[in-house]
Amino acid sequence: MGTITAAVLAAFVGYGAAWYFGAVEGNFSLLLFLASVVTGIYWLAERFYFLPQRYKAAATLEQNAASRKAELSKMGIDQVDNESNLVEARTRLIMQPWWLDWTAGLFPVIVVVFLLRSFLFEPFKIPSGSMIPTLLINDLILVNKFHYGVRLPVLNIKVIDNQSPQRGDVMVFRYPPKPSLDYIKRVVGVPGDEVAYVNKKLTVNGKPLPKTPLPDFFDEDVLRYAKQFEEVNGGKKYRLLNDDTRRAGVDEREVLDFPFKQNCRYSSEGMVCKVPEGQYFMMGDNRDNSLDSRYWGFVPEKNIVGKAFFVWMNFGNLKRIGSFE
């Protein structure tokens, strides 16, 4: 079993290394699920077979020692092997071997992490500046996995309904052109909405969203200022950035071919899209530096991961810790 276990552990390590170096597309949910299954099998085997076998061997050792002691006593020999040797031998027999320690021993921790991450809260790291100023690069955030309904891990199939995404929510989802990637943007349009972004002004169902100027935002990563505004959508207030040096319109040549693309119209001033049923229109708060629904289309309901709501750590700026809208 030691050899088999070594091969299994080597396979996990090899997969992780290949993922790290970009040789394969990693899927952490699948990896965690497989680790839970494999360690669970070892845990059951340990609980109902290997551990009883070790205790049985220890009991046999004690029984043989007692029989030997009785036979020697009949022969008038009172001095027998040191009792400490028997205790040490029994301890060695009961001790869990390394291959069970690294599998069955890890099962409780792995399965708890798997359940928490799959059904309650999942941590994410912000990799880009598309959500500045709401979220900064290297913010470590928590995502509520049950806010939009309970989904089966790995398959991401909803089994229990909860709330629907609302305008203004910050949502994590599987990137439609490449579902193995997780993206984070803000919901600006829900099914049935007509979303227009023209001359850097967002309009939903013909109503321009309130947009109040704020003091310029200084981006420490690029050492430059950007125009900052407060916008209100779905009753939620949040800040956004605009870059005066970037054009307002979307070049249709930069737009991917996506489902329901016929629902969108593009011009040099911007774009207008009618959100289909079961789909959502997403935009980054860093409006002129965000690859979002303007370029790759709508997010289907099946791609939803959860609602982002809390920054739990930023090692470069502890003041970032806290909830956000």
Image: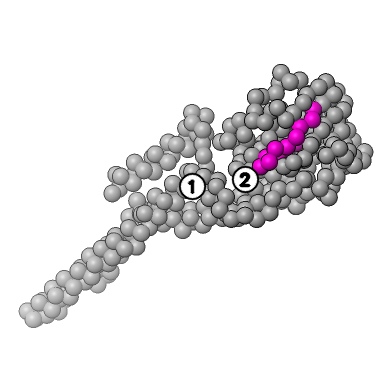
Q: Is residue 36 magenta?
A: no
Measuring from the top left, give residue 149's x and y in whole percent: 62, 53
Q: Secondary structure at mark 2?
A: strand
Task: Between label 1 and label 2, give the one nearer the viewer.
Answer: 2
Left of 143 or right of it: where is 60?
left
Q: CA distance from mark 1 to mark 2?
A: 16 Å
Which amino acid type corresponds to the residue marked 1 in the rendered image? Leu
Measuring from the top left, give residue 247's x and y in whole percent: 83, 22
Disc number for residue 305:
2
Q: Secondary structure at mark 1?
A: helix
Chief secondary structure of the magenta portion: strand
Left of 7 or right of it: where is 255?
right
Which amino acid type corresponds to the residue marked 2 in the rendered image? Val
Name the residue: 85% across, 29% down: 198
Q: Residues within 10 Å of mark 1 (few under 14, many from 20)?
A: many
Q: Is residue 274 magenta?
A: yes
Closest to the observer, 48 or 190? 190
N-term mark: 1 or 2: 1
Name the residue carrying label 1. Answer: 32
Name the residue: 43% across, 39% down: 13
Measuring from the top left, give residue 100's x and y in whole percent: 35, 54
Q: How many marks?
A: 2
| Range drawn in magenta | 271-283
